[in-house]
Image: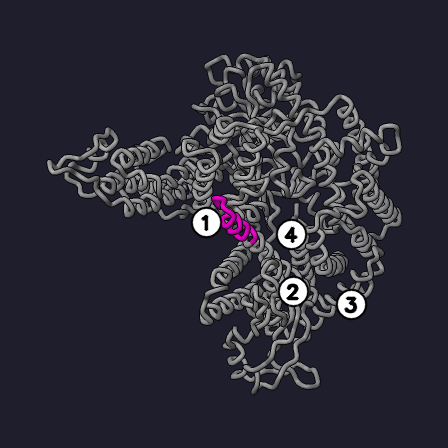
Amino acid sequence: MLFSRRAVAAASRIRHQQIVASSSLSTSRSLQASAGRTTHLHPHQQQQRAWLSSLNEPTLFPAIVNSDDAVDNSSSSDGSPIANKNLYDDHMLRSDVRTMGTLLGDAIALHNGEDVLEKVEKMRKMAKESRALQTDGEERLTPMVDFVSNLSAKELVIISRAFAQFLGVANAAEAHQRCRRLKLDLTKEGSEGNLGALHETKRDSTAGVLSQFLNDKKASKEELFQSLVTQTVELVLTAHPTQVNRRTLLEKHGRVQKILNDADSIRDNGTPYQRQLLDDDLRREIASIWQTDEVSRVKPSPQDEAERGTLVIETVLWEVLPSFLRKLDAEMKSTMGGEYGLPLTASPFKFASWMGGDRDGNPNVTPNVTREVCLTNRIKAARLFEADVRELMGLISGNPPRGMDDKCRYESSAMDRVRERAGADSRAPFRSYLHPVATKLKTTSAWARQELQQLQKKNSTNGSAGELDENQPRATLISVDEVYLSKDELMEELLTVHQSLCDTGNAVVANGRLVDIIRKLSAFGLTLVPLDVRQESDNHSEALDCITKYLGLGSYSQWDEEARVNWITQQLQSKRPLIRAGTWNEAGSEECFTPTAKDALDTFEMISEQHEASLGAYVISQCTSASDILAVLLLQRDAGVKKPLRVVPLFETLDDLKGAAATMEQLLSIPAYIDSLEDRKQEVMIGYSDSAKDAGRLAASWAQYETQVELSQVAKKHNVDFVYFHGKGGTVGRGGNPNTFDAVVSHAPGTINGQFRVTEQGEMINQNFGYSDRAERTLDLYTAAVLAEQHTDRPLPTKEWKDMMDKLSDISCDAYRKIVRDDERFVPYFRAATPELELSNLNIGSRPAKRKATGGVESLRAIPWIFAWTQTRLNLPTWLGVGEAINEVLASEDEKTLRTMYKEWGSFRTTIDLVEMILAKSDSSIARHYENVLVSDPETMALGGEIRKIHDATEHAIMDLSGHKTLSENDHLLLRLMAVRNPYVDCLNVLQAETLMRLRQSEEGSSEEEVLKDALLTTITGVANGMGNTG
């Protein structure tokens, strides 16, 4: 039970109060009058309550039944002991959630009153009872609807906060639960004779893949070794606005997980005092969470987003990555033999970022913003490496032993280099050798900060930005000659120390902390994360149009594709620049150069200034032709970029995907472009979000699959290696899949080939990498998946299956567009029945919700498109069109073919199962409630009814094809989680619909409007926490 009441004793007996509640958000009451009215505590009593020992309160340390069935007399927070050690972890999750819920209830009662808590509990009970009715009709919500209609605006805020905060801490408990299970699994594996570094018994762990593939003779040791040492997963962190929780709350949830982890470590042998400290820590943290504002009041800047994005590297991945690689090395040696260890400088993982570089539709990302972020990243990287090197200096303070003749027993050129710098008489040569390295890293950080401060001062309107002393003599400024700009220079020095240690009989020392630093340098370099630059193709065309007009050549925009390609090709073969640098910013240039063109040209000028590895790729969104790609290459060369960024076309819409092969065929037929490719490698980005918004999930999935197959054939024809960059979001509607391993392996054969580049966006960054155990598991999943993909036989679909997919795609796309594009009632329905219009108030991202200020759904970004439907739990973009296609084929002579495809073709089955999972999480009765409350137009209301009928028909079609009697009937974890969460999300949905109605009727600028906005944003956060994702 949540928020249930607890019997209370008199104030004089408060320390002896017996805990009898059994709820997730039950509350340890302060004091109550016997008549049931809340009494006010005397200050002394309040102080007494505040200092209550946590051992007399809900605790993280419930009793556990021992193997001999002897039960400790203490109990869990619901009053019952944990019953069986085999179910230890499942019981502990429930106990943790109950304990934190109880503490949250305490905070609510203390700070907002018993009456508020009673209302929260009353609504929770209504939701539980409505779910127990097992009816899908909207009438089950009536008691809650009537209840919230009588709440004041402030009560809407507080009650919404209660449910949202509970789901937030419940998420923290579930995240810790996953980590707890991973630890238990490893402990079990170790006891059964396995190494226990990674999960050998899991099919989706690298250790499991190695063991299985060797046992089944799917690959030899040499083949698996070569795959592991050459494959690369590059994770690109993006600032897509899908993380609704404030950083402050994420940090608090992280501390909650640490407390839970610490509690596990002392559960069996800790002292009462140690347990009391952790119980008190948890109480303090939960109390602080309740008093923390969950609404972001200020929109983040791109610099803020970049700062938050790299935080996960600084605080988690910086140590988790080398730890994982050490475990991978151990598993490789254990499974395949000692000679098959991970090479020292192998880079199974690389990292990049769009934060500060992605300017597509975001006018806030300027060239100077990118300059700032690049310098900030260098500051962070230098500081991190300096700390590591200084730590290493303390660890390798020894001196290789000498013989009686005072000569070193080992001859080594590496050691000679060490002594040459350290001095022949140095008693700690390795430390002495590394001291200048640490100093130079410190200087590198200071140089980057100096450059950042000068940039900020230059850009400041009042000339006061930064901390650089104006009176500082120019001669004392740090020169680039004094710093590390290339990771190769630092790598050479670290490898020298490693080799010298190995050569002098200190291999065990060499392979300690030093190896971790070398592997960090391989993965992160001296820029921490190189930035990709992304911009729309139209901006480049506009820049070239201004240039051709300025040169008197006519209008580039008016030329056809052939003329554009021919002109750009000619310019690429010429060494003469098109225009003089800075021409576009000279006085009077406004007549020839538009603001958009100036920004584009300034961006290329910025690119030309950046030092090695600051930037990665240049991604062209809305790419539709070969000239779009050639234009970026030309503009880079014209700006004087010494080593042009690799140019990456992003194919997003259905038409773009279908035309991608022809575009790349034309491009690769141009010798000037082929010559520009480094190592004949071409990167191509596949857009999952916008293609699904454009055509629906099923048609988009097939277009993405088929496009990659066709592109691979083009690459093979031209002897070029294609690397695919997968632009996926966290939700299924944006290409996401919670099963990372199967998602990777289900890609079209011959398209990954050991090189997998993928975006990690918004809330998924924190979910996958916010905590060390989860981050390590994510790295393991990616490594295992890319390895397994290379050695898993997955033939391409037969012509019969391809024809069937074409048919399904056409039917589903037509059905999807018939509603979304062609029905004039749809846009009014979407904007009335969802909080789409209000989402911009969330302040969770620096970019606007639309690429352009005008336009309808077509101009709306994919994230708010998915976000809005997730809030109402209809999840329309994921399933619309799928049911129509399946039903039509099942009713035709092709039924057998379709059923065979589902059983035998993994990629197709994965797509259908994902849609089924989303339908299991959906609730059309909630969507109907939003319609009844918010939609007034009869015709628009009628469309809602039609859509819900399609939804129900899609459910039946999916179950017919899968053979399931209920949706996702084999996904027991999902069903259990949804059964627990649904009542609380129901409450938030009812609160949100009521708040939306009042907000849209409120007087603009009134005090009540501001309160209602807070209530709405709180419910949005709560629903996102409950559903597990946003956009």
**Does residue 349 appear to the left or right of 993 in the view shown?**
left
Q: Is residue 191 magenta?
A: yes
For discs 1 and 4, the disc positioned in front in the rendered view: 1
Q: Is residue 278 magenta?
A: no
Identified by mark 4, the residue type is: Asn
Q: Nearer the viewer, residue 169 or 889?
A: 889
Q: Nearer the viewer, residue 923 or 297?
A: 923
Question: Marks 4 and 3, Cα distance to the nearest angstrom?
Answer: 27 Å
Quarter where residue 984 is shown: bottom right
Q: Secondary structure at mark 2?
A: helix
For discs 4 and 3, the disc positioned in front in the rendered view: 3
* Image height of 752 relative to 262, above or below: above
**Does residue 909 appear to the left or right of 708 in the view shown?**
right
Which stretch is magenta?
181-196
Question: Label 3, on which residue?
Answer: 147
Q: Position of residue 409 (x, y in %)?
A: 19, 34
The answer to whether residue 313 shows anywhere in this view is no
Task: Say which quadrant the C terminus sits in.
Answer: top right
* Image height of 989 relative to 6, above or below: above
Question: Label 1, on which residue?
Answer: 315
Question: Label 2, on which residue?
Answer: 162
Question: Label 4, on which residue?
Answer: 841
Question: Marks 3 and 1, Cα distance to the nearest angstrom?
Answer: 45 Å
Identified by mark 2, the residue type is: Ala
Identified by mark 3, the residue type is: Phe
**Does residue 539 appear to the left or right of 979 in the view shown?**
left
The answer to whether residue 690 shows anywhere in this view is yes
